[in-house]
Amino acid sequence: MECQKLNPGCTEMHQLLASLRLSQDRPADAKASLVKVVEALQDCDEDSVPTFHSQVELAKMLLEVELTKECKMILYTLLDVDEKDSFLWYLLGQCYLSQRNHRNAFKCLSKALQAIPDDADDMADLKADIAKFLQEAKDALGTAAADVDVDSDMSDSEVAFDGDDDDDDADDDDDDDDDDDEGQKEDSKAADA
C-alpha cells in the first residue's frame, strides 16, 4: 500500500490490486480499484498509457465485475489499434450480451469469428466459445438475425460512453420487434381460422 501513498494515480498498481481482489473473491473491492484505473487512464499522457496487453487484461476484469460501459470504452480504443483482433471482438460481444443487446453482440461475435484464420488450430477453444455465444445471440434475435448487417458500423447511440446507457434502448427496440412479430403471427393465425 506504500505505492498507493506515493503515486495514487498509478494505473498498474490499481490494476494489480484489482486482480488480487478478484483472486480473493472480493469483487466489490476489485471494482473500486478498477474504477480508479479507468479514472487514471482518462488523465494519462501518451507516455504513461498502459501496454496493449495490459489494457486487454483490464477489459477482461472490467467485464468480470460488470463495468460494461468502461469495458466497451477500453475495447473500442484497442480496436482502433487492431480491428482484426478476434479476442477484442469476442470480449466486446460479451459486453453486449451481458447488456442483453443481442444485435450488437451478434455483430461483434460474428466479427470475432471472421477474424480467426481457418488454419489457427491454437485458437480452437476461442472459436468454440465464440460460436456458442454467437448462437445465443442469434437465438435471442430469432428471425431478425438474418437482417443484421454484420459489416455495418454500430451507431454512436449503440456505443454510449457519456453516461447515458443507450444500450438499454437498443434492447427495448429488439424486444418491441419481437412483440410485433408475435402479434403479426397471432393476427395471421386468427385470419386463417
Image (tube, rainbow, N blue to C red):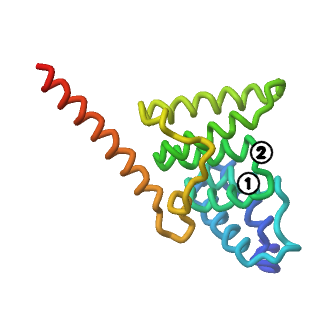
Q: Residue furthest front?
A: 191
Q: Which mark is residue 102?
A: none
Residue 17 position by quadrant: bottom right
Q: Position of residue 39 (x, y in %)?
A: 67, 73
Residue 1 position by quadrant: bottom right
Residue beneath the point at 54% across and 71% down: 162
Q: Name the residue under label 2.
A: 84
- Mark 2, Cα crowd under 10 Å, few <14 / some 14-19 / many 20+, is some
In the image, 54 versus 52, the foreground residue is 52
Amino acid type of the residue tagged 2 in the rendering: Lys
In this rendering, is residue 146 above or below 68? above
Q: Under tag 2, what secondary structure?
A: loop
Residue beneath the point at 59% across and 28% down: 132
In this rendering, is residue 14 above or below 114? below
The answer for how far apart the CA atoms under marks 1 and 2 are is: 8 Å
Residue 34 position by quadrant: bottom right
- Mark 1, Cα crowd under 10 Å, few <14 / some 14-19 / many 20+, is some
Q: Where is residue 79 in the image (x, y as percent from the top left)?
A: 73, 54
Does 60 sit left or right of 176 as displayed? right
Does 137 sit left or right of 37 as displayed? left
Q: Which mark is residue 79?
A: 1
Residue beneath the point at 80% across and 31% down: 117
Residue beneath the point at 71% across and 47% down: 88
